[in-house]
Amino acid sequence: MKLNVIVGTLLWSNLALAQQPDLVKYVNTLQGTNSSFELTRGNTYPTTALPFGMNTWTPQTGKNGDGWKYQYTKKKIRGFQQAHQCSSWTNDYAVFSFMPIIGKLTVNEDDRATGFSHANETARPDYYKVKLDNGITTEMAPTERGAHLRFSFPKKEASYLVLDGYTKMSLVKIIPEERKIIGYVNNGHYKTANFRNYFVAVFDKPFVAYGTWENRKNTVQATAANAEGEGVGAYIQFKAGEQVQVKVASSYISTEQAELNLQRELGAFKNLDDTRKAAAAVWNKYLSRVLVEDTSEVNKATFYSCFFRASLFSRQFFEYDKNGQPYYYSPYDGKIYYGYMYTDTGFWDTFRAQFPLNTILHPTMHGRYMQALLAAKEQCGWLPAWSFPGEGGSMIGNHAISLLTDAWVKGIRTFDPEKALAAYLYEATNKGPWGPANGRHGWKEYYQLGYVPYPEYGEATAKTLEYAYDDFCGYQLANEVKAPFYAGIFAKQMYNYRNVFDSTTGFMRGRNSKGQWLADFDPTEWGGPYTEGCAWHWVWSVFHDVQGLINLLGGEQHFTAKLDSVFTRPNTFKVGTYGRPIHEMTEMAMANMGQYAHGNQPIQHMIYLYNYAGEPWKAQYHAREVMRRLYNATEDGYPGDEDQGQTSSWYVLSALGFYSVCPGTDQYVLGSPLFQKVTITLENGKQLTIKANGNSGENVYIQQATLNGVPYTKNYITHADILNGGVWEFTMGNNPNTARGISHTDKPFSLSAIKQ
């Protein structure tokens, strides 16, 4: 059975018996939680979950409905909730929470909030524990579709547990003779009319008293066993000073399926400690797929904390029926289908590194995901762009084609490429009803003019650049499967990036429908024709034709000089059309690396472009600098939004020594391996060992390399070379080897031919 499909207790018995290194100890799930609207250090919450699990669990410091559900600086906890949130900016869906109370029953979320200290908090993937200031201890351990919780109340204190139905419609039914609560919640965005998250909670101690309540006016109905309405919840009283355990699971299909999920995933565990041990075994086996051997415990903590975050999204949105067959409630049309479905990701972020990482480690899961993309198209009429759990169309671009093409060129061929191409052509020639990335803004002008005009369309230059890359992916897939009709269409458009390049300034610029450049140009001005950035960030967004960009910028020396300038320019900005500093601007200034804004996606690949222009040692230096300066395993662990595993996946890939500059090709571009030795265990049973002899914080430059004993001068590695396994060995030093990796044959893929 493949590691990427972890089906509750079906695998846990074997996993628990396996002797694995204790890697969970390195993961700090508080990484990146010191975030706010004004400044992001990750925008994460302390997630207790299994890899790609349908549900996660977390303590809640923010008010119901607040996207900042847990902030490190807050002093009180108001609940312990089931969560699915992939971004603070999108809030959450399908949420309900528990909160233990002592003394007097208190349901109001502000009044019941209780103080805590981080000194009394343990935050790991397999286990969360906190002792509140009033003496109550709460513990949580995860399964894929549920969790095991334990509440230890102080002796002689009246002991209550409050279930909060969160922000929209909910139902609760208390069954005291079975020590059980069942119900549903339906809060969230981008969901169908009949969307419900059905939950079942089974307790190990009897109820002394119970009732229902609602969180609009905080009225309580003592002894009531049933209620349905907006914000409806329940409360239970236990014997004073009791220690109570609850097994809880949920389903998007039915209460009966929630019961089945609970029995399958939690039925075999007598107590929370058993569930925790099983979860730790899952994570240790999972994390050991990338086994790091190095003297730096700090770097290992950062790596495994990032690897954890890279392993949460996209989430499973499928369940297993009584016969063990996968099926799911569709968040797109509200119907039930057999097969696999995934959700909770925005492709604008994750096509860059998170999904390419999955093609290496989880090809079976990735193949199922490609099937789910086309199933979503059939169910809602559009390929997904931002699923949460249905389609939101947020951000820009049509990057589902990037995922599909990347899978195909890497040998993951679980889908019909003709259907994929037809679906993409529809995306590229229409505008859908949801958000900028549902279809294309300005698709007619893009086709007729060769670019999206500004100010006729917001973020037009950024959209042009990403459409051109997506069109390359469409062309690439069409070429691979010999579909000349589609190849001919996309071949005409994949060079459209040239049409927004202004040779007089050396930047990609806004251009109106008459062909005129936007006046009063300042490359440090954010917004307008750009998405969450400025001209310094967007000039590099030609993933598929870096050589073409080199040509536009006047050749390799001018190109690398401009790359250098990103780091030497002042870290200043103009707010532009945003009208005020947004957190991405603040984070760029704080990073103090010039105009390099690693806290957001558009420029994250830029460091690796030195490999295309004869100066690969600069990519080695800057990759290590970003890892050293901008990442750590603490609450301040990220330089901006973590974004559904993307910023973490950048670190994971970069620490291995390479990065996915152009998904849709089979190449990963070389950087500088962070560790002395890493062993990647692949799904096919082979292993790739990456050894960096003499590696250290100073020895960041590659002196020489071999792959399976053969000298290796290329500035990239292919997907096939990774899957074939073996030993990729480097000799590291503290001075650049300027003679290595500089021939034309060493350069990564570009559409344009290299000028001799």
Image (cartoon, grey):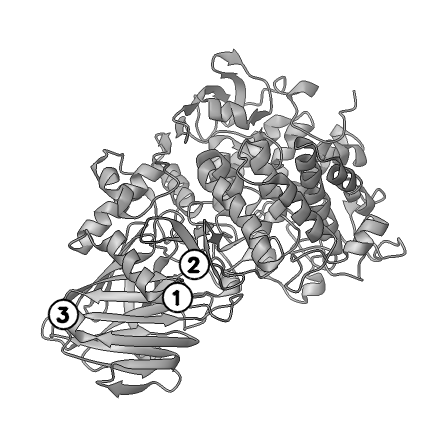
Q: Quadrant of residue 608?
A: top right
Q: Residues within 10 Å of mark 2 (few under 14, many from 20)?
A: many
Q: Is residue 681 visible?
A: yes
User: What is the three-letter code of the residue carrying label 1?
Assistant: Asn
Residue 154: numbered disc? 3
Work out how far the residue at label 3 is from the one at label 2, CA to CA, in angstroms.
Answer: 30 Å
User: What is the three-letter code of the residue carrying label 2?
Assistant: Asn
Q: Residues within 10 Å of mark 3 (few under 14, many from 20)?
A: some
SS class of the residue under badge 3? Answer: loop
Residue 365, percent from left and from top:
45, 41
Residue 627, percent from left and from top:
49, 39
Q: Earlier in the sequence, mark 3 or mark 2?
A: 2
Residue 197: numbered disc? 1
Residue 61, percent from left and from top:
37, 68
SS class of the residue under badge 2? Answer: loop
Would residue 352 appear left or right of 52 to someone viewing this image?
right
Residue 417: numbered disc? none
Would residue 388 appear left or right of 501 to someone viewing this image?
left
Work out how far the residue at label 1 is from the one at label 2, CA to CA, in angstroms.
Answer: 30 Å
- Residue of label 2: 34
Q: Residue at x 37, y 31 (%)?
A: 292
Q: Is residue 660 visible?
A: no
Q: Earlier in the sequence, mark 3 or mark 1?
A: 3
Q: Residue at x 80, y 62 (%)?
A: 456
Q: Earlier in the sequence, mark 1 or mark 2?
A: 2
User: What is the three-letter code of the residue carrying label 3?
Assistant: Pro
Q: How many marks?
A: 3
Q: Are discs 3 and 2 less than 8 Å apart at CB?
A: no
Would residue 523 appear left or right of 217 to someone viewing this image?
right
Q: Nearer the viewer, residue 603 or 352?
A: 352
| Mark in front: 1 vs 2 | 1
